[in-house]
Image (cartoon, rainbow, N blue to C red):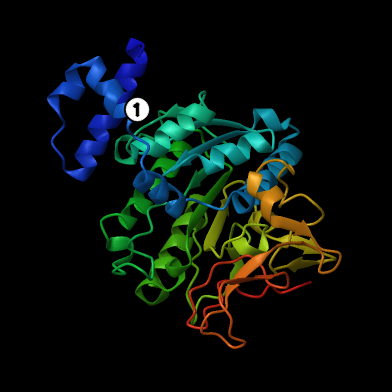
Amino acid sequence: MPPDTADFWRGVYRTACTIKGVVPKKSILTSDKALAKWHNQLHTDGAEYKMWGNGMALPNALFFVSRAVAQISADEHRPADTVKLGSLFDGSGTMPLAAVMCGATPVWASEVEPYPIAVTKTHLPNVRHLGNVSAIDGGKIEPVDIFTFGSPCQDLSIAGRRKGLKGQKSSLFCEAIRIASEMLAATGGRYPRFVIWENVYGALSSNGGDDFEIVLNELLHLTGSNEFIRQHGIWGGFAGYGEVAYRVVDAKYWGVPQRRKRVYAVADTGGESANEILFDRKGDEWNFRPRLPAGKAVAGLADDCYCWHERMVQAKSSGGGNLAYTLKIRQGCDGGGKGALIQTELSATLATNNDQTLFAPVTKE
């Protein structure tokens, strides 16, 4: 390892140990050989499983990032490659990758898990890594046009203990808001133009919906508005308020063979075009329905972007989208028989219902 590379990875190691409450090994801190050995063993099945489990569906992220880039380009008469993106709680670099794919420039990311950092460093070597969000001063880092963050969701998820935004991990949402506020203050309100937040579907119901009300209002106040958004009953699947909007998306409608519901919220600090980032137009009205990818491309991705696209997805002459072949376990089900039955009328979305059908039907448009 070159000295600067070794210094970077020692910093990653120290940060990971601090967050996990583990005493750093002296050998890794002092020996380049021990450091290289630790680095080369970052990839494990567990690390990869955790990374993908926490990851975003790229077609969703690409859709929203590309629309934000296009809006900035149109409003400010700038080419896409001058639009900059920064990503907090970056994971394996989904948001920076989306920026690259639509011609924009990712400039920095913040992540603390060593393996996802290694993945991002490999594929996006020019992205600067800022480390722990708690140590970032938003007024001192490079300003960005698009500020993205998928704050830790363990305390919001219905699979967790539902501590909400007051939980130790999900409270990091406030750190992201702080960093965005500091950047806005340092740039006279110019940067960031768009703030994009992503989280689990359970965020809508955490603490009876009160947490999501806080999320929307914190995003709204980044725009300089003194208004408040109040919860009235159960949060729906989408809503637009001008400067702020949110939308629930499910990856199974975007060409991904998996059911993965996520909430995206956008704040427009320089206007009232949040709706235009999150929703498609259909005539003079907004189209809130799930988005099925058209033709052979998967939600804007190149045909050869994923190897599973060629293996699993077959274009359909009806329904207006691409559906993947799916499997149904027949043993113990109606119809009898053993083994898996290939089904072509279902979308490839894993479910765990007691009917032993692994995939849920798709709604055709």
Question: Would residue 110 be seen by someone viewing this image from the given angle?
Answer: no
**Position above or below: 73 against 346:** above
The crowd level at tag 1 (other Cα within 10 Å; few <14, some 14-19, many 20+) is: few
* Viewport quadrant of the C terminus: bottom right
Give the residue at mark 1: 40
- Which of 247/174 is in front? 247
**Position above or below: 95 against 281:** above
- Which of 285/350 is in front? 350
Residue 92 spot, x, y in % from top left: 47, 40
Residue 193 spot, x, y in % from top left: 59, 42
Q: Is residue 340 left or right of residue 304?
A: left
Residue farthest to the front, as pictured:
337
- Which of 188/8 is in front? 8
Q: Is residue 332 left or right of residue 114?
A: right
**Position above or below: 338 against 84:** below
Residue farthest to the bottom, as pictured:
334
Residue 36 spot, x, y in % from top left: 30, 21
